[in-house]
Amino acid sequence: MSALVEGAAAPLVNASRFRAAHEAEWDRLDQLVTRIEKRSVRALSEDDILALPLLYRSALSSLSVARETSLDRALVTYLEQLCTRAYFQLYGVPDTALRQLGGFLARDWPSAVRSLWRETLACLILTIAGAVAGWWLVATDPSWYYSIIPDAMASGRDPAASVETLRATIYGKQEGGALATFAAYLFTHNSQVAIFAFALGFAFTVPTVLLLVYNGLTLGAMLCLFAQKGLGLNFLGWLTIHGSTEMFAIILAGAAGMKIGTAVAFPGREARTEAAVLAGRKAAVAMAGVVLMLMVAGLLEGIGRQTVQADAMRYGIGLAALAGWLAYYYLPRRREGQDALAA
């Protein structure tokens, strides 16, 4: 009789031991899943995120053991519900497209740009150096202008042009849509430079460096041309209204390409392919933002060309846009995960 009693009690003892051995893990998984359900995955710390899949697999293993050994039904039901909740948080339907776009604009894009600050500074220096060199070459010998500026970009805007002709390119309208053609060419040219600066960065950054220097050369050459005709500040104002965004976009595209190129050239302990992939993740996010910047630059260029004629207004819009981009990218932000945990 006593043997029968001990045999009947054995499963209960085993169930108690099983629960005691794993209950802490189940409780932690339950807490993490509940936190995600009430807030979001950003409410978890890095350690919690790393632990979540391990705890989920451990709970699945516990569920399998509970079913196979016929432990009490309440425990099996609890584990089934817990594993189901965890599954949907790990592998369920992702955020809506609107929330993903919001996350890109609020966190991913500025974070990617901030991670490229060294490359961005280097690209800015290269562009400025190119502009100074272009100005100096044209100021020293105007014939350099024809070597630096393509005919399609010049379109009669050369050292032989009169002051009235050059003034017409930055104010008012021209017959035959020449001003619109010139503006469209500039935007297309700068967009191509941005795309190629990024795409060719993998070649040890050499093409990216050359493109940035050349882009600076064209900028310096044109500024020198207009300055020699007494229109330097006027042309700079026309350029600033959209160029502050456009040139910033080119510099960021070059920085993204340079990030990949330096990873390929100096992979460290990683294989070159792996190093390029790791660098490309942030660079690709930054480049996606560059496309949006170029779209904004196109809108600003249209406003500057068609409606805004006052130099002060052009400078104001351009500098305000630049200040907005700098604040958006580089002003310090508190990590959302820390905010949620603190709450």
Image: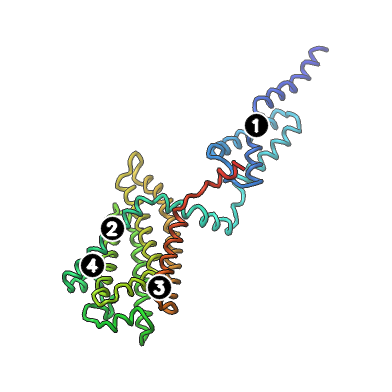
Q: What SS does tag 1 mark?
A: helix
Residue at 30%, 58% (x, y): give it: 208
Q: Which residue in the protein does label 2 denote?
A: 126
Q: What SS does tag 4 mark?
A: helix
Spatial separation of the CA atoms under disc 1 and disc 3: 71 Å
| Relative image position of residue 237 (x, y in whole percent) | 36, 72
The residue lying furthest to the top in this view is 2
Marks 4 and 1 close (CB-CB < 8 Å): no
Choose top left, top right, bottom left or bottom right for residue 337.
Answer: top right
Q: Which residue in the protein does label 4 denote?
A: 135
Query: Mark 2 against mark 1, which lies toward the viewer?
Result: 2
Quarter that holds the N terminus: top right
Q: Nearer the viewer, residue 205 or 299?
A: 299
Q: Earlier in the sequence, mark 4 or mark 1?
A: 1
Spatial separation of the CA atoms under disc 2 and disc 1: 60 Å
Q: Residues within 10 Å of mark 1 (few under 14, many from 20)?
A: many
Which residue type does callout 1 highlight? Ser
Spatial separation of the CA atoms under disc 4 and disc 2: 14 Å
Residue at 50%, 49% (x, y): give it: 333
* Mark seen at residue 189: none
Q: Earlier in the sequence, mark 1 or mark 3?
A: 1
Spatial separation of the CA atoms under disc 2 and disc 3: 28 Å
| Relative image position of residue 192 (x, y in whole percent) | 35, 66
Q: Nearer the viewer, residue 43 or 192?
A: 43
* Mark seen at residue 62: 1
- Decide: is 214 above or below 260: below
